[in-house]
Image (cartoon, rainbow, N blue to C red):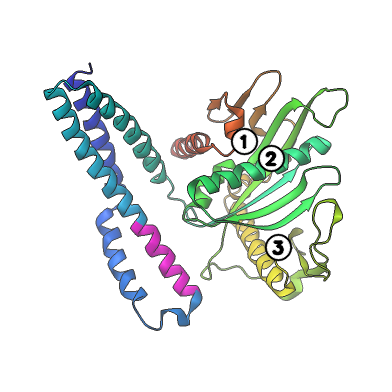
Amino acid sequence: MRVATDFAEQIKALDGTLSSIEKVLDVDSMRSEIADLQEQVSAPDLWNDQANAQRVTGRLNTLQHDTERVANLRARIEDLEVLVELSQEEADADSIAEAETELSRLRTEIESLEVRTLLSGEYDEREALVSIRSGAGGVDAADFAEMLQRMYVRWAERHGYPTEVYDVSYAEEAGIKSTTFAVKAPYAYGTLSVEAGTHRLVRISPFDNQGRRQTSFAAVEVVPVLEETDQIDLPDEEVRVDVYRSSGPGGQSVNTTDSAVRLTHIPTGTVVSCQNEKSQLQNKASAMVILKAKLLALKKAEERAHLDELRGDVQASWGDQMRNYVLNPYQMVKDLRTEHESGNTQAVLDGEIDDFVEAGIRWRRNNEGSA
């Protein structure tokens, strides 16, 4: 049976961690801002300015969710203290086992919330635009790029985060050449930005009739979604606009009009495209959002003199990979920066990447602190 002092020490440690989180988040200020935003939401003319209305309601929802999450954890710690006291007074083995389970769950959830407090970068609160492109490895690389897209979309689904695919360029045989999609949740950029870099897959190729092991690469780029207050000068003469017909796998046409849009920023050579909408105007607007986000990332990265920080501008080949996915001759996913690893490769590829993401965020903060 677990001794009382052991339980008490662990609960005290969790209580201390949660108190530190409450201090960093400044919960009192959050509640004050919630009151102010609620007044704005109640204004009859709020939706006259839709962009501002979406910003206000989005910020309000985020703050309410965060304060409720902290309050819930605080209440659960207090309930756990009562449960432990009663179960040990009565020597109730079932209740002690229940307390063990709740203690473990609380530790996991508080550690996850603690990681959120490390997201304090300039754009960490923003939604994320994720781009994936296949690298060295031929058809296996294209297939791997599609596997990664599925992994991140499944991760978002697990958290209830909406996603929107803006563009997919399908490979001829299987998989995709590239894709760009948005993860529409607060702190999506700060969270997923640690996923930027080259990912490497080792497996028996399903496309090799001799069953040989194949190594392939894919590059992941993550940039923040811009807001109207972000200053990006984009003169019309610096952007070339090309329109073409949207297409799906195998060259099948999504529609019969030239609605897909490709934008090229002439000074930097940055190219983005969008084909998810049926309207050419809608696709152009979405592509412009992506282009401005990438140009802002490029601008900030150049200012800081290390391009990888925001863009994750990588070659997707040997020598610069940040994570290995090995499916043969053994099963292992390992992050080469944090040393975090998992033997359950299928679960990782199904979107269970929280442990990798949290390890990446802690690693980044530690590196920043020692820089």
Where does label 2 land, which residue?
A: 147
Q: Farthest residue in the left direction?
A: 89
Q: Earlier in the sequence, mark 1 or mark 3?
A: 3
Amino acid residing under circle 2: Met
Instruction: Give the camera-side residue of 290 and 246.
Output: 246
Q: Is residue 19 visible?
A: no
Secondary structure type for disc 1? helix
Instruction: Give the camera-side residue of 124 and 79.
Output: 79
The answer to whether residue 40 is left or right of residue 235 is left
Secondary structure type for disc 2? helix
Range of residues picked out in magenta: 51-64
The answer to whether residue 191 is left or right of residue 10 is right
Amino acid residing under circle 1: Leu
Do the residues bearing badges 2 and 1 touch, measured as CB atoms within 8 Å?
yes
**Residue 159, magenta (yes or no):** no
The answer to whether residue 113 is left or right of residue 11 is right
Where does label 1 land, which residue?
A: 349
Quarter of the N terminus within the rendering: top left
**Residue lying at 64% horizontally and 45% vertically, measured from the top left:** 312
Location of residue 189 in the rendering, given as x and y in whole percent from the top left corner:
53, 51
Instruction: Give the camera-side residue of 132 and 120.
Output: 132
Secondary structure type for disc 3? loop
The image shows residue 330, relative to residue 303, as above or below, that is above
